[in-house]
Image (cartoon, rainbow, N blue to C red):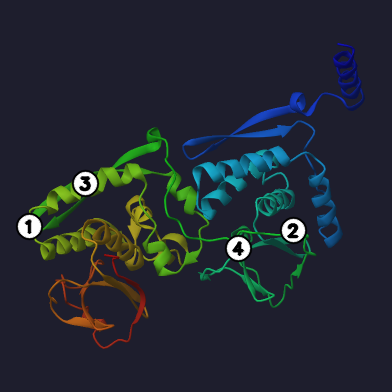
Amino acid sequence: MKLRLTILIFICLLQLLTGKSYAQNERQHHVEFYGDTVMIPLGTSAFVDFNKPLSDSSVREFYKSMESAGYLPVIEALTSYRENKKPDDWLFYQLIRKTAQMISPKTENYQRYTLYKWYFLLQTGYDAILTINGNKMLMYAQSNDAIYEIPFRTINHKQYVCLNYHDYGQIDFDKNVFTQVAAVQLQPKRIFSYSITRLPAFTKSKYREKDISFIYNESRYAFKIRINQEVKDIFANYPVVDYEKYFNIPLSEETYSSLVPSLKKVLRKMSQKEGVAYLMYFTRHSFVYKTDTEVFGKEKRLSPEQTLLYEYSDCEDRAALFFFLVKEIYNLPMIALAFPKHVTVAVKFDKPIGETILYKGEHYSICEPTPQAFNLSIGQTPKDLMKTAFEVVYAYHPVK
């Protein structure tokens, strides 16, 4: 009894000396994350400010302050979500961004916001580095993926891809030399991947209906698909990745269930050739054609769901949607063909149709999913491309 009393007195004295216990001082913050509510425990005194000029020493000082500020529960909450929900790296990075925004809003202090993201990336196992030039700070993560239109650095034979270049627009790296902040001595275990294998389970109330229709064989077909504007948020800063990655980004469950079963119902009375032709016309004539430059002012490849979501799309976007639908419904071998100014898809049927492309001993028939001057059938190539060189940028072969 005396021992218990002694321990209780000791705890009370300790709390009087140090203030409230961390558990008492801790508040549960809610981060709304695309259908999930992630609880982030944060001590009321854990905030670390940053108002010094950017330098190697000021960044390292910030890091040391974060180490002693009690952010372990935040790191544990982030890693616990990753272990339980298994989001892809790009999706997990969006959670890191939202968590950093909650603690240190981007508009209040951009450098501090970026430093919080960098710290959380490091503490959750990624190899993240910072480079600085005056008041500019670029954050990179090690990645083995082929990424286009954004900066990357090679350090010790490792590729690092910039995650926040979009915040600065265009930087002339010949005139603006960025120096790397001295590395923090950690043992990173994760290589950042831009592959997206599934989308979040969005809240159903966030979806709205969109009417799409097209004419095939003199009959009009209409569909009501369910789309979610949050998909735009997820992919707002997603870079241009290789064709294999973005062709294989799936639909969200709600959008999938509003479209694919309806398509299958229409196609079940058609032959395989008729069904693929139907899907070709669907992607060709259900959306308005505009180039990326017209819509976004730059190159931007849309995932299949984004193509359904946006009002406008180009050849690459329609090729991705057509590929997804043929793979999902028929699971046929396909190749993606990149011409200098055009991307299309060729499908391998049981028997070749029309003029074919021979690739690795197999014949593929072009199925043009983008509107052309003439209404092309399976196996027909646009006239302006007949003698143009192309590259097979992605080949899909089902695993039997």
The quadrant where residue 16 appears:
top right
Between tags 2 and 4, which lies in front?
Answer: 2
Question: Residue 184 — which label?
Answer: none
The location of residue 248, given as percent across then percent down, is 37, 60
Question: Residue 261 — which label?
Answer: 3
Q: Secondary structure at mark 3?
A: helix
Which quadrant is home to the C terminus?
A: bottom left
- Mark 3 residue type: Pro
Q: Secondary structure at mark 2?
A: loop
**Pointer 3 or 1: first along the chain:** 1
Label 4 sits on residue? 169
Q: Secondary structure at mark 1?
A: loop
Question: Residue 218 — which label?
Answer: 1
Distance from Cα at disc 2 to Cα at disc 4: 31 Å
Question: Residue 186 — which label?
Answer: 2
Seen at 83% across and 62% down, the residue is 56
**Pointer 4 or 3: first along the chain:** 4
Cβ–Cβ under 8 Å for marks 3 and 1: no
The location of residue 238, given as percent across then percent down, is 50, 58
**Pointer 1 or 2: first along the chain:** 2
Farthest-out residue, bottom? 387
Between tags 1 and 2, which lies in front?
Answer: 2
- Mark 1 residue type: Glu
The location of residue 84, given as percent across then percent down, is 52, 41
Is any atom of residue 380 visible in this view? yes
- Mark 4 residue type: Gly
Distance from Cα at disc 1 to Cα at disc 2: 64 Å
